[in-house]
Image (spheres, rainbow, N blue to C red):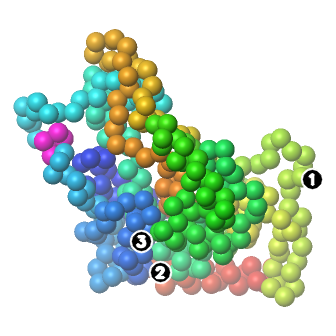
Amino acid sequence: MLRFYTAGESHGQALLAFISGLPAQLPVDMKFINHELRKIEKDTAEIFAGVRHGKTIGAPIALRIENRDWANWEKILPVGAAEEDPGTRKLVAPRPGHADLAGSQKFNYHDARYILERASARETAARVAAGAFAKLLLREFDTEIASHTIQVGHVRLEKPATWKKIQAVSADLDSPLRCIDAAVQEKMKAEVDAVLKAGDTVGGIFEIVAHHVPVGLGSHAQWDEKLGGVTGAGSFGSEVQDEIFYEKSERRFRRSTNRAGGLEGGITNGEDVVVRGYLKPISTLRQPLHTTDMVTKEPVKAAYERSDWCVVPAGAVAGEAMVALVLADAFLQKFGGDSLAEMRRNFDNYAQQIDAF
């Protein structure tokens, strides 16, 4: 089983990620890992356990993403006991839509600082680093994952996207919103510019595609063994299902469409696995909404922390990481193996079974 967890605060000294369950002898490409991070983060990852001579050793892996801005926050977020600094940036005006108030009530703080530090979207950088390891494993079996932006605010991409176009825009660090259509992307940028001027934020939709996924990951047998998908609840069955045909040239069963997003009965069916994420506008606004001070109980304007205006492309990168981690776990459960070589033998034997079906 592949397991991971993260630690660290948004403005803290570093973010940490811990990964266990990867097979030994998996080549680790640090340039690839840091390229994944560069999609959302300027800081880079450093490995300090579980990798030797450029390969995994079968032990848990530990990663560290140092916060280069830590010097400006060290007095505000001291680890040891310290007298309260006059410059301490308490947050007592919780932001509507954020975890500030509910988290402060839950953990009994009259200061949302320690809630927002962990609830911040920057935590996802550690997940992206962990997901990069999952992608490295999947790549060994020719499975790749990429994403693109479908909608920002009221602007939506209406045409279908090919795998090659998604793959290209997903890897392009210079593409501001990672939309496959340049004209639509310009309209999306205008939408973002409009909310920037208004001091507002905007959400949207991203799509993640896992390409060349083998048949048979996941299981129908138990609820927690299924890989989940979204069905067309408001449609007729004839509008949702994918008709099946046999492609003699490839000696494999195919679907004429991929409305199911590569999943049937909680099992991958050999088509691309497609996942869409719906991201609401983030809750930190430069023109803040009304709220109530947690200490005085008086009406005030919500606090403002550093913020972007549209995080749809960044959300897609975090989504890629989570899809990669789920699929890598399904690979490990299906094919097992303590080393990459053993896992590959199991995979190849299964591939022969599918070819002969």
Residues rendered magenta in the picture: 74-78
Identify which amino acid the numbered label 2 is placed on: Leu
Question: In the displayed image of the protein, which residue is found farthest to the bottom?
Answer: 249
In this rendering, position of residue 117 left or right of residue 186:
left
> Callout 2: helix, strand or loop?
helix
Select label 2 or label 3 by which is in front: 3
Q: Which residue is mark 3?
A: 35
Residue 340: mark? 2
Residue 238: mark? 1
The alpha-carbon separation of the residues under discs 2 and 3 comes to 23 Å
Q: Quadrant of residue 203?
A: top right
Please determine whether, in this image, residue 251 is positioned above or below residue 230: below
Q: Quadrant of the C terminus?
A: bottom right
Q: Residues within 10 Å of mark 3 (few under 14, many from 20)?
A: some
Check whether the beta carbons of the residues at disc 2 and disc 1 lie within 8 A of each other.
Answer: no
Q: Position of residue 39 (x, y in %)?
A: 44, 64
In this rendering, position of residue 178 left or right of residue 79:
right
Please determine whether, in this image, residue 312 is positioned above or below residue 169: above
Q: Earlier in the sequence, mark 2 or mark 3?
A: 3
The alpha-carbon separation of the residues under discs 2 and 1 comes to 42 Å
* Residue 76 in view here: yes
The alpha-carbon separation of the residues under discs 1 and 3 comes to 42 Å
Q: Residues within 10 Å of mark 1 (few under 14, many from 20)?
A: few
Q: Is residue 291 magenta?
A: no
In this rendering, position of residue 145 left or right of residue 40:
right
Q: Position of residue 213 (x, y in %)?
A: 66, 71
